[in-house]
Image: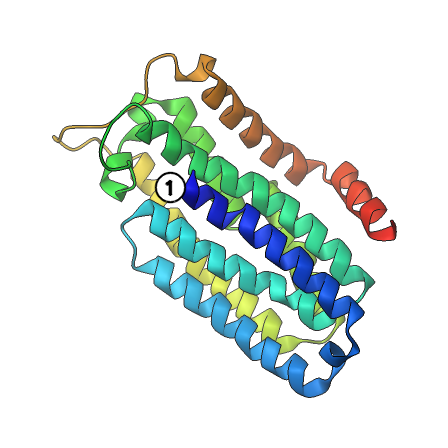
Amino acid sequence: PATIFLATVSKLAVFVVLLRLVLAAPVFHSEWLQTLITALAVLTMLGGNLLALFQANLKRLLGYSSIAHFGYLLVAIVAGNALATETTGVYLVTYLVTTLTAFGVVTLLSSPFGGEDADGLPVYRGLFWRRPYLAAVMTVSFLSLAGIPLTAGFIGKFYVIALGVAESRWWLVGGIVAGSAIGLYYYLRVMVTLYLPEPGMRRRDVSNDWGSRLGGITLMALAVTILVLGIYPAPMIDWVQGLSIG
């Protein structure tokens, strides 16, 4: 729960305040400061993804991945216009739902046990053969984090890239593409692990009735939300636009 909070709520609050400051303070529109933020954004995108690339601990992998996603959002800070506000709203909604789903699976697998959390990647090997629906939920969340079409994450990343192209911020667009390519590799590594044959080791698993408990129901609802937002994002976009106008 502490990791979920740091990866979601804290980043959401900080970024909303930061964007508000950028829109209100003229100094952020100076060329030198925008150049500095652009450099920080590219470093954050690449640094977060490269750190996640070498992780075998799933919580750390998702934590470093969240750093990279914060770098993607810095595109809106550089743009600092009305479309940036809409982009921020859409991206934060899709990121929040996706990250809650991914960390929720880790929490669900950890909760029946004492001691260390189920955060080692080997713990998730063969999860599909034990808990196919839970593996499907995790797969959907990682597809969304990678920005694969028909998921909520694709809508958010499309907005960020479109904003970078509209503002001719080609270094940022290049950073997003390069960071996403690195991210796709380690996201796929996790997803493939879910479907590998089980090794002959002591496994950690959720209870048989996980799908009928509140945590399991919430996870499945979040996974469905990821797919619905990816296929039909119009209501979410209208809602974000309404907030921006207000």
Quadrant for the N terminus in the image: top left
Viewer can see residue 148: no
Q: Which residue is mark 1?
A: 191
Viewer can see residue 128: yes
The total number of labels drawn is 1
Residues 66 and 226: in front is 66
Residues 29 and 181: in front is 29
Q: In this view, which residue lies farthest toward the bottom?
A: 32
Q: In this view, which residue lies farthest toward the left?
A: 200
Q: Residue at x 68, y 59 (%)?
A: 17
Q: Would you place residue 231 above or below residue 56 in this image?
A: above
Asked which colour scheme the image uses, the reply is: rainbow
Tell me residue 207's x, y (percent).
32, 17
Q: Say what secondary structure mark 1 lies in.
A: helix
Q: Residue at x 47, y 49 (%)?
A: 6
Q: Would you place residue 239 above or below residue 22 in this image?
A: above
Tell me residue 23's x, y (percent).
78, 67
